[in-house]
Image: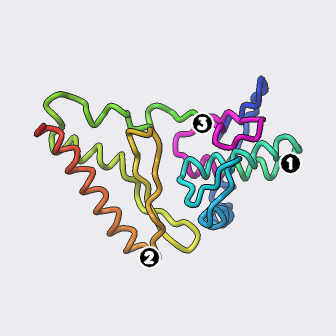
Amino acid sequence: MILKAMIDDHVYQLNVPDALLSQARDYFDRLDLDMDAGWQMSREWVSKPDRLQRCQIVADKLLTALESENEKLGLLMAGYILARLPGVESVELDVQGEIQNNNFTIAEALTPAPEAPQASAGGMSKLDAMEQAGKDVTNVFKVGRGYRFSVFDHAAGSWQDAPLAATQEEAARLRQQAFKARYEALLGQRRH
């Protein structure tokens, strides 16, 4: 997989082998575990970084790796971003040290359309609402020793991570509740 990293006018093509992505899963989980305790993002302390913020933090480490020509670390950081942000094509790195200004470009086909929930004045059919809810609520994934899922927040235009659950079953139960709430909200729009 390829991630383009842009620093001012320079574009780096980081070709991350699929083998590295699978071999580095434990390393990525350790990064998540470190960030679970909170992180200083420039001048702001973020107690529970969401998926996007985590990728912005890792993008800052990617910038350091590229500036110091540490190819191995650069590929690992690019691999984390590719693994955690499905469909990511590029990252524009902020050289001023403002972590929250690291911006990502996501492939349109993989990004839920922000206007989809209000697709038509008549609302969504049950099938369309179920399909959209499936796009808006990810499957459960492992983070360190815990499990979680993410929900796409259309108002903010970003993914929000659910709280960390101790077991996969608990995370699956919470995910089902989130999926049901999203589905019912989409159906409810047709009644208004």
Residue 179 in sight from this viewpoint: yes
Mark number displayed over residue 167: 2
Residue 35 magenta-highlighted: no
Label located before the other in sequence (3 or 2): 3
Question: SS of the residue at dot 2?
Answer: loop
Residue 17 in sight from this viewpoint: no
Mark number displayed over residue 60: none
Mark 3 lies on residue: 104
Q: Name the residue at 23% across, 48% down.
A: 130
Q: Name the residue at 67% across, 33% down.
A: 92
Q: CA distance from mark 3 to mark 2?
A: 31 Å
Q: Is residue 10 above or below residue 64?
A: above
Mark 1 lies on residue: 70
Q: Nearer the viewer, residue 4 or 36?
A: 36
Task: Locate the N terminus and report the quarter of the image it occupies.
Answer: top right
Spot occupied by residue 55 in the image (x, y as percentages of width and height):
62, 48
Residue furthest to the right: 68
The magenta segment: 80-102
Q: Name the residue at 66% across, 38% down.
A: 102
Q: Name the residue at 72% across, 31% down.
A: 6
Residue type, mark 1 in image: Asn
Spot occupied by residue 112 in the image (x, y as percentages of width and height):
39, 38
Question: SS of the residue at dot 3?
Answer: strand
Q: Nearer the viewer, residue 107 or 120?
A: 120
Question: Looking at the image, how many numbered discs can be counted on the residues?
Answer: 3
Residue type, mark 2 in image: Thr
125 with respect to 136 (left or right) = left
Q: CA distance from mark 2 to mark 1?
A: 36 Å
Q: Is residue 28 above or below residue 75?
A: below
Residue type, mark 3 in image: Phe
